Image: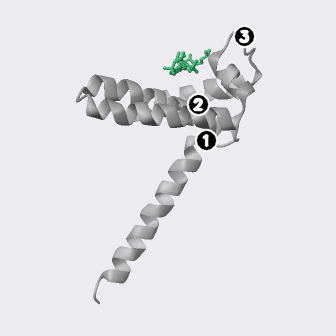
Amino acid sequence: MQETMETLAKLEALLAERKNADPDTSYVAKLYAKGAKKIAQKVGEEAVETAMAVASDDNRELVKESADLLFHLMVLLEARGLTLADVVAELARREGLSGLAEKANRPD
Ligand SMILES: N=c1c2ncn([C@@H]3O[C@H](COP(=O)(O)OP(=O)(O)OP(=O)(O)O)[C@@H](O)[C@H]3O)c2ncn1[C@@H]1O[C@H](COP(=O)(O)O)[C@@H](O)[C@H]1O
């Protein structure tokens, strides 16, 4: 788990650095130069490829396509000045909400 978080943090730092890179030498800088709407389109394509990988019944392919999807989603978030921490904070908020909902459904 810690290794997962470290890898994501390193990638996020690299994506932030690439905001100042030359689009001719960096794929990520090229994506930033195209703008958030184009990056979002790429996220959509990768999401479709991820879904299609399920049909192939090949988990290795599913992992590869999921990596492409997560990577492009992180680039999109960075392009909009957001981070994975913002997304995780939303998930944590929902967990809090479901905790409240469970309490509300519990008879006293
Ligand atoms: N994790 C990735 C990563 N995953 C996927 N990709 C690229 O995402 C693209 C995947 O899109 P496709 O499969 O559709 O391939 P494509 O047809 O070439 O893409 P398009 O021309 O359609 O955009 C490929 O070009 C991959 O090389 C990535 N490119 C970069 N990274 C990371 O980002 C870092 C910075 O990259 P640069 O900005 O290139 O230095 C790298 O060190 C890596 O850690």
Q: Is residue 106 above or below residue 37?
A: below
Give the quarter of the image for residue 78. top right
Residue 100 in picture, x, y percent from top left: 42, 74
Which labelled disc corresponds to residue 83? 1
Foreground residue among 73 and 38: 38
Of mark 1 and mark 3, the one earlier in the sequence is 3
Residue 14 in picture, x, y percent from top left: 62, 23
Q: CA distance from mark 2 to mark 1?
A: 8 Å
For the residue labelled by badge 1, is the local secondary structure a helix, a strand or a loop?
loop
- What is the quadrant of the C terminus in the image? bottom left
The answer, for residue 51, to whether it is visible in the render is: yes
| Residue at image coords 74%, 17% | 21
Residue 83 in picture, x, y percent from top left: 61, 41
Horizontal relation, residue 64 to residue 27: left or right: left
Give the quarter of the image for residue 33. top right
Name the residue type under label 1: Thr
Q: CA distance from mark 3 to mark 2?
A: 21 Å
For the residue labelled by badge 2, is the local secondary structure a helix, a strand or a loop?
helix
Mark 2: few, some, or many residues within 10 Å (few <14, many ≥20)? some
Which labelled disc corresponds to residue 24? 3
Furthest residue to the top?
A: 25
Name the residue type under label 3: Asp
Residue 13 in picture, x, y percent from top left: 62, 28
| Residue at image coords 67%, 38% | 37
Q: Which residue is mark 2?
A: 12
